[in-house]
Amino acid sequence: MGINGTEKTAFIGHPTDLNLFRSYIRYLKPSKQYRDEFLVKLFEWTPPYKVKEFPHLSFDGKQSIDALLIMAPFLPEMRDIKIKRVIGKIDKALAIAAAEGCTVAAMGGFTSIVLQGIEKDLSEKYSIKITSGNSLTAAIILRSIETIARTFDINLAESSVAVIGASGDIGSACMGYLGMRVKKLNLTARSIPTLKDVVDRHKGYLTCETALSDNNREAVMASNICIFTTSAYTHLFTEADFKPYTVVCDASAPVNVKVLGDVRDDVFIYHGGVASLPFSLDPGFDIGLASPNTFYGCQLEGLMLGLNPALPCSWGRGNISGEKLGLFLKELDVYPSMNVVFSLGDRLYSKEQLDGYAEHWKEKSHA
Protein backbone atom coordinates (compact mmCIF):
# COMPACT_ATOMS: atom_id res chain seq x y z
CA MET A 1 0.00 0.00 0.00
CA GLY A 2 1.03 3.60 -0.57
CA ILE A 3 0.74 6.70 1.56
CA ASN A 4 -2.23 6.74 3.99
CA GLY A 5 -3.38 3.30 2.85
CA THR A 6 -3.90 4.14 -0.82
CA GLU A 7 -3.09 1.60 -3.50
CA LYS A 8 0.36 1.75 -5.03
CA THR A 9 1.55 0.77 -8.51
CA ALA A 10 5.09 0.22 -9.73
CA PHE A 11 6.06 1.40 -13.20
CA ILE A 12 8.92 -0.91 -14.23
CA GLY A 13 10.69 0.19 -17.38
CA HIS A 14 13.94 0.63 -19.22
CA PRO A 15 15.34 3.08 -21.79
CA THR A 16 14.40 1.97 -25.29
CA ASP A 17 17.67 3.15 -26.80
CA LEU A 18 21.10 4.45 -25.84
CA ASN A 19 20.11 8.10 -26.38
CA LEU A 20 17.44 7.88 -23.67
CA PHE A 21 19.91 6.26 -21.28
CA ARG A 22 22.40 9.01 -22.09
CA SER A 23 19.70 11.53 -21.20
CA TYR A 24 19.34 9.91 -17.79
CA ILE A 25 23.10 9.93 -17.22
CA ARG A 26 23.14 13.66 -18.05
CA TYR A 27 20.37 14.11 -15.49
CA LEU A 28 22.52 12.41 -12.83
CA LYS A 29 25.91 13.80 -13.92
CA PRO A 30 25.32 16.93 -16.05
CA SER A 31 29.05 17.74 -16.31
CA LYS A 32 30.17 14.26 -17.39
CA GLN A 33 30.56 12.83 -20.91
CA TYR A 34 30.79 9.09 -21.49
CA ARG A 35 31.62 7.01 -24.56
CA ASP A 36 28.90 4.69 -25.88
CA GLU A 37 30.99 1.61 -25.10
CA PHE A 38 31.20 2.62 -21.46
CA LEU A 39 27.48 3.38 -21.27
CA VAL A 40 26.65 -0.09 -22.57
CA LYS A 41 28.89 -1.66 -19.94
CA LEU A 42 27.31 0.56 -17.31
CA PHE A 43 23.95 -0.88 -18.35
CA GLU A 44 25.22 -4.39 -17.76
CA TRP A 45 26.68 -3.61 -14.34
CA THR A 46 23.88 -1.49 -12.89
CA PRO A 47 21.19 -3.25 -10.82
CA PRO A 48 17.54 -2.09 -10.81
CA TYR A 49 16.80 0.93 -8.63
CA LYS A 50 13.99 3.19 -7.54
CA VAL A 51 13.88 6.40 -9.58
CA LYS A 52 10.99 8.49 -8.28
CA GLU A 53 7.76 8.45 -6.25
CA PHE A 54 4.50 9.89 -7.62
CA PRO A 55 2.08 10.28 -4.69
CA HIS A 56 -1.66 10.97 -4.73
CA LEU A 57 -2.39 10.62 -8.44
CA SER A 58 -6.06 11.15 -9.27
CA PHE A 59 -8.03 11.11 -12.51
CA ASP A 60 -11.29 12.36 -10.98
CA GLY A 61 -10.36 14.29 -7.83
CA LYS A 62 -11.89 11.52 -5.69
CA GLN A 63 -9.94 8.27 -5.84
CA SER A 64 -6.17 8.53 -5.66
CA ILE A 65 -3.29 6.13 -6.12
CA ASP A 66 0.45 6.28 -5.52
CA ALA A 67 3.03 5.24 -8.08
CA LEU A 68 6.72 4.41 -8.10
CA LEU A 69 9.07 4.40 -11.11
CA ILE A 70 11.68 1.62 -11.07
CA MET A 71 14.45 1.38 -13.65
CA ALA A 72 15.59 -2.03 -14.93
CA PRO A 73 18.77 -1.03 -16.80
CA PHE A 74 18.93 -2.92 -20.08
CA LEU A 75 18.65 -2.14 -23.77
CA PRO A 76 16.16 -4.03 -25.99
CA GLU A 77 18.93 -5.78 -27.92
CA MET A 78 20.33 -7.25 -24.71
CA ARG A 79 17.36 -9.64 -24.49
CA ASP A 80 18.79 -11.60 -27.45
CA ILE A 81 22.28 -12.06 -26.06
CA LYS A 82 21.98 -11.83 -22.26
CA ILE A 83 18.45 -12.98 -21.53
CA LYS A 84 19.22 -14.51 -18.11
CA ARG A 85 20.81 -11.28 -16.92
CA VAL A 86 17.84 -9.26 -18.16
CA ILE A 87 15.35 -11.60 -16.42
CA GLY A 88 17.43 -11.30 -13.26
CA LYS A 89 17.19 -7.51 -13.39
CA ILE A 90 13.43 -7.59 -13.83
CA ASP A 91 13.15 -10.08 -10.94
CA LYS A 92 15.06 -7.66 -8.71
CA ALA A 93 12.90 -4.76 -9.89
CA LEU A 94 9.81 -6.69 -8.82
CA ALA A 95 11.44 -7.35 -5.45
CA ILE A 96 11.88 -3.58 -5.01
CA ALA A 97 8.24 -3.01 -5.96
CA ALA A 98 7.03 -5.57 -3.42
CA ALA A 99 9.27 -4.18 -0.68
CA GLU A 100 7.89 -0.67 -1.38
CA GLY A 101 4.33 -1.89 -0.83
CA CYS A 102 3.19 -1.95 -4.44
CA THR A 103 0.20 -4.17 -5.20
CA VAL A 104 0.53 -3.90 -8.98
CA ALA A 105 3.56 -3.87 -11.28
CA ALA A 106 3.07 -2.47 -14.78
CA MET A 107 5.79 -3.65 -17.14
CA GLY A 108 6.96 -1.20 -19.78
CA GLY A 109 8.75 -1.77 -23.08
CA PHE A 110 10.52 -5.13 -23.43
CA THR A 111 10.14 -6.11 -19.77
CA SER A 112 6.81 -7.80 -20.50
CA ILE A 113 8.17 -9.54 -23.61
CA VAL A 114 11.10 -10.98 -21.65
CA LEU A 115 8.81 -12.33 -18.92
CA GLN A 116 6.32 -14.12 -21.17
CA GLY A 117 5.66 -17.56 -19.71
CA ILE A 118 7.06 -16.87 -16.24
CA GLU A 119 4.89 -13.96 -15.12
CA LYS A 120 2.63 -16.19 -13.00
CA ASP A 121 5.62 -17.55 -11.08
CA LEU A 122 6.95 -14.07 -10.34
CA SER A 123 3.50 -12.77 -9.41
CA GLU A 124 3.17 -15.54 -6.83
CA LYS A 125 6.76 -15.10 -5.65
CA TYR A 126 6.22 -11.45 -4.76
CA SER A 127 2.43 -11.47 -4.13
CA ILE A 128 1.95 -8.72 -6.67
CA LYS A 129 -0.24 -8.34 -9.75
CA ILE A 130 1.84 -8.11 -12.93
CA THR A 131 0.53 -6.66 -16.18
CA SER A 132 2.02 -5.98 -19.59
CA GLY A 133 -0.47 -3.14 -20.00
CA ASN A 134 -1.29 -4.30 -23.51
CA SER A 135 -5.08 -4.12 -23.13
CA LEU A 136 -5.15 -0.42 -22.26
CA THR A 137 -2.46 0.29 -24.87
CA ALA A 138 -4.60 -1.36 -27.55
CA ALA A 139 -7.68 0.55 -26.34
CA ILE A 140 -5.81 3.87 -26.59
CA ILE A 141 -4.53 3.01 -30.08
CA LEU A 142 -7.99 2.11 -31.34
CA ARG A 143 -9.61 5.15 -29.76
CA SER A 144 -6.95 7.30 -31.48
CA ILE A 145 -7.64 5.69 -34.88
CA GLU A 146 -11.37 6.37 -34.52
CA THR A 147 -10.66 9.95 -33.42
CA ILE A 148 -8.41 10.64 -36.40
CA ALA A 149 -10.92 9.02 -38.76
CA ARG A 150 -13.63 11.41 -37.53
CA THR A 151 -11.31 14.42 -37.59
CA PHE A 152 -9.92 13.72 -41.08
CA ASP A 153 -13.28 12.55 -42.47
CA ILE A 154 -11.91 9.07 -43.20
CA ASN A 155 -14.53 6.36 -43.71
CA LEU A 156 -13.19 3.36 -41.78
CA ALA A 157 -15.69 1.06 -43.50
CA GLU A 158 -13.94 1.86 -46.81
CA SER A 159 -10.39 1.80 -45.43
CA SER A 160 -7.57 -0.70 -45.76
CA VAL A 161 -5.56 -1.00 -42.55
CA ALA A 162 -2.11 -2.52 -42.13
CA VAL A 163 -1.24 -4.00 -38.74
CA ILE A 164 2.51 -4.52 -38.67
CA GLY A 165 3.22 -7.04 -35.95
CA ALA A 166 -0.28 -8.50 -35.96
CA SER A 167 0.61 -11.74 -34.17
CA GLY A 168 1.55 -9.94 -30.96
CA ASP A 169 -0.83 -9.16 -28.14
CA ILE A 170 -1.49 -5.53 -29.09
CA GLY A 171 -1.48 -6.18 -32.82
CA SER A 172 -3.96 -9.03 -32.57
CA ALA A 173 -6.26 -6.92 -30.36
CA CYS A 174 -6.25 -4.18 -32.99
CA MET A 175 -6.92 -6.80 -35.66
CA GLY A 176 -9.90 -8.24 -33.78
CA TYR A 177 -11.50 -4.84 -33.14
CA LEU A 178 -10.93 -3.38 -36.60
CA GLY A 179 -11.88 -6.63 -38.32
CA MET A 180 -15.55 -5.71 -37.87
CA ARG A 181 -15.13 -2.06 -38.84
CA VAL A 182 -12.85 -1.73 -41.89
CA LYS A 183 -12.90 -2.91 -45.48
CA LYS A 184 -9.63 -4.84 -45.43
CA LEU A 185 -6.85 -5.80 -43.01
CA ASN A 186 -3.29 -6.28 -44.27
CA LEU A 187 -1.65 -8.27 -41.48
CA THR A 188 2.06 -8.97 -41.13
CA ALA A 189 4.30 -10.95 -38.80
CA ARG A 190 7.71 -12.59 -38.99
CA SER A 191 6.11 -16.04 -38.75
CA ILE A 192 3.18 -16.71 -41.07
CA PRO A 193 2.16 -19.95 -39.24
CA THR A 194 2.01 -18.03 -35.95
CA LEU A 195 0.02 -15.27 -37.62
CA LYS A 196 -2.43 -17.81 -39.06
CA ASP A 197 -2.95 -19.31 -35.60
CA VAL A 198 -3.69 -15.88 -34.12
CA VAL A 199 -6.09 -15.03 -36.95
CA ASP A 200 -7.90 -18.33 -36.42
CA ARG A 201 -8.35 -17.53 -32.71
CA HIS A 202 -9.88 -14.17 -33.61
CA LYS A 203 -11.91 -15.30 -36.62
CA GLY A 204 -15.15 -14.67 -34.74
CA TYR A 205 -14.34 -10.95 -34.88
CA LEU A 206 -13.16 -10.80 -38.48
CA THR A 207 -15.84 -9.92 -41.03
CA CYS A 208 -13.61 -7.96 -43.44
CA GLU A 209 -11.22 -9.15 -46.11
CA THR A 210 -7.81 -10.16 -44.72
CA ALA A 211 -4.38 -10.60 -46.28
CA LEU A 212 -1.53 -12.26 -44.38
CA SER A 213 2.11 -11.60 -45.23
CA ASP A 214 5.64 -11.30 -43.91
CA ASN A 215 6.27 -8.39 -46.30
CA ASN A 216 5.76 -5.18 -44.32
CA ARG A 217 6.35 -2.90 -47.28
CA GLU A 218 3.67 -4.51 -49.43
CA ALA A 219 1.17 -4.29 -46.58
CA VAL A 220 1.97 -0.61 -45.98
CA MET A 221 1.64 0.31 -49.65
CA ALA A 222 -1.75 -1.42 -49.83
CA SER A 223 -3.16 0.53 -46.85
CA ASN A 224 -4.30 4.04 -46.01
CA ILE A 225 -3.97 3.47 -42.24
CA CYS A 226 -0.89 1.74 -40.79
CA ILE A 227 -0.48 0.58 -37.19
CA PHE A 228 2.97 -0.51 -36.00
CA THR A 229 3.02 -2.83 -32.97
CA THR A 230 6.23 -4.78 -33.47
CA SER A 231 8.94 -5.85 -31.04
CA ALA A 232 11.65 -4.78 -33.48
CA TYR A 233 14.30 -2.51 -32.00
CA THR A 234 15.42 -0.94 -35.28
CA HIS A 235 13.69 1.47 -37.64
CA LEU A 236 11.71 -0.26 -40.37
CA PHE A 237 10.44 2.77 -42.34
CA THR A 238 10.92 6.50 -42.83
CA GLU A 239 8.23 9.07 -43.55
CA ALA A 240 9.20 8.90 -47.24
CA ASP A 241 8.07 5.25 -47.49
CA PHE A 242 4.31 5.86 -47.27
CA LYS A 243 1.93 6.66 -50.07
CA PRO A 244 0.12 10.02 -49.94
CA TYR A 245 -2.74 10.41 -47.45
CA THR A 246 -1.69 7.66 -45.08
CA VAL A 247 -2.26 7.76 -41.33
CA VAL A 248 0.62 6.12 -39.43
CA CYS A 249 0.18 5.09 -35.80
CA ASP A 250 3.60 4.00 -34.51
CA ALA A 251 2.94 2.26 -31.20
CA SER A 252 6.28 0.45 -31.03
CA ALA A 253 9.00 1.31 -28.56
CA PRO A 254 11.57 1.94 -29.92
CA VAL A 255 9.59 3.51 -32.74
CA ASN A 256 9.57 1.72 -36.10
CA VAL A 257 9.20 4.85 -38.24
CA LYS A 258 12.09 7.29 -38.34
CA VAL A 259 11.27 10.87 -39.31
CA LEU A 260 14.30 12.30 -41.06
CA GLY A 261 13.11 15.84 -41.74
CA ASP A 262 9.93 17.85 -41.83
CA VAL A 263 6.84 15.66 -41.65
CA ARG A 264 4.92 15.51 -44.92
CA ASP A 265 1.55 17.23 -44.97
CA ASP A 266 0.04 14.23 -46.77
CA VAL A 267 1.24 11.65 -44.21
CA PHE A 268 0.10 11.91 -40.59
CA ILE A 269 2.51 10.11 -38.23
CA TYR A 270 2.02 9.94 -34.49
CA HIS A 271 3.18 7.95 -31.47
CA GLY A 272 0.36 5.54 -30.60
CA GLY A 273 -0.58 4.05 -27.25
CA VAL A 274 0.07 7.29 -25.36
CA ALA A 275 -2.54 9.12 -23.26
CA SER A 276 -2.84 12.63 -21.84
CA LEU A 277 -3.16 13.02 -18.07
CA PRO A 278 -4.60 15.53 -15.58
CA PHE A 279 -1.33 15.31 -13.61
CA SER A 280 2.40 15.20 -14.31
CA LEU A 281 4.52 12.04 -14.38
CA ASP A 282 7.81 13.81 -14.96
CA PRO A 283 10.82 11.72 -13.88
CA GLY A 284 13.13 14.66 -14.61
CA PHE A 285 14.75 13.21 -17.73
CA ASP A 286 13.78 12.19 -21.26
CA ILE A 287 11.67 9.01 -21.46
CA GLY A 288 10.66 9.44 -25.09
CA LEU A 289 7.49 11.46 -24.55
CA ALA A 290 6.54 14.94 -25.71
CA SER A 291 5.09 16.15 -22.39
CA PRO A 292 5.19 15.22 -18.68
CA ASN A 293 1.38 15.25 -18.85
CA THR A 294 1.42 12.24 -21.18
CA PHE A 295 2.38 8.66 -20.41
CA TYR A 296 2.53 5.19 -21.92
CA GLY A 297 -0.69 3.18 -21.89
CA CYS A 298 1.13 0.00 -20.86
CA GLN A 299 2.05 1.56 -17.52
CA LEU A 300 -1.15 3.53 -17.05
CA GLU A 301 -2.92 0.16 -17.04
CA GLY A 302 -1.18 -0.43 -13.72
CA LEU A 303 -2.99 2.59 -12.29
CA MET A 304 -6.30 1.31 -13.65
CA LEU A 305 -5.75 -2.08 -11.99
CA GLY A 306 -4.95 -0.38 -8.71
CA LEU A 307 -8.06 1.80 -8.87
CA ASN A 308 -10.29 -1.03 -10.12
CA PRO A 309 -8.98 -4.41 -8.88
CA ALA A 310 -11.73 -6.26 -10.78
CA LEU A 311 -10.02 -5.47 -14.10
CA PRO A 312 -8.02 -8.35 -15.62
CA CYS A 313 -4.25 -8.20 -15.99
CA SER A 314 -2.81 -8.35 -19.50
CA TRP A 315 -0.39 -11.10 -20.48
CA GLY A 316 0.63 -13.44 -23.27
CA ARG A 317 0.28 -13.36 -27.03
CA GLY A 318 -3.06 -12.93 -28.73
CA ASN A 319 -4.98 -13.07 -25.44
CA ILE A 320 -6.88 -9.77 -25.60
CA SER A 321 -10.43 -10.81 -26.36
CA GLY A 322 -13.09 -8.43 -27.55
CA GLU A 323 -14.63 -8.57 -24.07
CA LYS A 324 -11.36 -7.67 -22.32
CA LEU A 325 -10.68 -4.86 -24.77
CA GLY A 326 -14.19 -3.56 -24.16
CA LEU A 327 -13.50 -3.29 -20.42
CA PHE A 328 -10.54 -1.01 -21.01
CA LEU A 329 -12.34 1.06 -23.63
CA LYS A 330 -14.97 1.67 -20.93
CA GLU A 331 -12.19 2.77 -18.55
CA LEU A 332 -11.33 5.53 -21.01
CA ASP A 333 -14.94 6.68 -20.70
CA VAL A 334 -14.94 6.37 -16.90
CA TYR A 335 -11.85 8.59 -16.70
CA PRO A 336 -12.29 11.18 -19.50
CA SER A 337 -9.30 13.14 -18.15
CA MET A 338 -7.16 10.29 -19.51
CA ASN A 339 -7.53 10.85 -23.24
CA VAL A 340 -5.77 10.01 -26.47
CA VAL A 341 -3.05 12.44 -27.45
CA PHE A 342 -1.22 12.95 -30.74
CA SER A 343 2.51 13.52 -30.59
CA LEU A 344 5.64 12.87 -32.59
CA GLY A 345 9.06 12.80 -30.99
CA ASP A 346 9.37 15.67 -28.55
CA ARG A 347 6.37 17.68 -29.75
CA LEU A 348 2.62 17.53 -29.38
CA TYR A 349 0.39 18.22 -32.36
CA SER A 350 -1.58 21.39 -31.71
CA LYS A 351 -5.25 21.72 -32.54
CA GLU A 352 -4.28 24.06 -35.39
CA GLN A 353 -1.93 21.46 -36.83
CA LEU A 354 -4.56 18.72 -36.60
CA ASP A 355 -7.09 21.04 -38.24
CA GLY A 356 -4.57 21.72 -41.02
CA TYR A 357 -4.13 18.01 -41.70
CA ALA A 358 -7.91 17.52 -41.59
CA GLU A 359 -8.46 20.29 -44.13
CA HIS A 360 -5.80 18.82 -46.40
CA TRP A 361 -7.41 15.34 -46.21
CA LYS A 362 -10.89 16.70 -46.87
CA GLU A 363 -9.66 18.69 -49.90
CA LYS A 364 -8.18 15.49 -51.28
CA SER A 365 -11.42 13.55 -50.75
CA HIS A 366 -13.43 16.18 -52.64
CA ALA A 367 -10.91 16.57 -55.48
Image: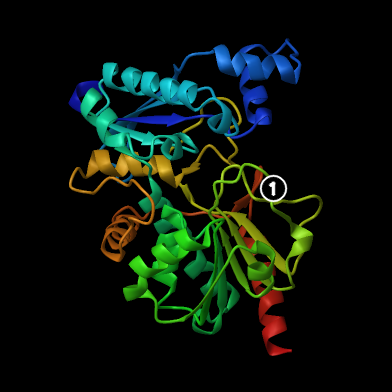
Q: Position of residue 147 (x, y in %)?
A: 50, 67
Left-right relation of 42 to 102 = right
Q: Position of residue 20 (x, y in %)?
A: 63, 30
Q: Which residue is mark 1?
A: 235
Disc 1 residue type?
His
Q: Residue at coordinates 43% horizontally, 46% vertically from top-left?
A: 297
Q: Residue at coordinates 69% horizontally, 71% vertically from top-left?
A: 221
Quarter of the figure with the N terminus: top left
Residue farthest right in this picture: 261
**Nearest the camera: 117 or 325?**
117
Q: Residues within 10 Å of mark 1 (few under 14, many from 20)?
A: few
- The image's colour scheme reads rainbow
**Nearest the camera: 219 or 134?**
219
Left-right relation of 233 to 82 = right
Q: Looking at the image, can residue 36 be seen?
A: yes
Left-right relation of 308 to 153 = left
Q: Position of residue 255 (x, y in %)?
A: 62, 47
**Nearest the camera: 69 or 294?**
69
Instruction: Work out whether 288 lies above or below 4.
Output: below
Residue 181 occupies quadrant: bottom left
Residue 218 occupies quadrant: bottom right
Quarter of the figure with the C terminus: bottom right
Q: Residue at coordinates 80% horizontally, 54% vertically from top-left?
A: 262
Q: Position of residue 28 (x, y in %)?
A: 61, 14
**Nearest the camera: 330 or 90?**
90
Left-right relation of 184 to 35 = left
Q: Residue at coordinates 42% horizontally, 29% vertically from top-left?
A: 12
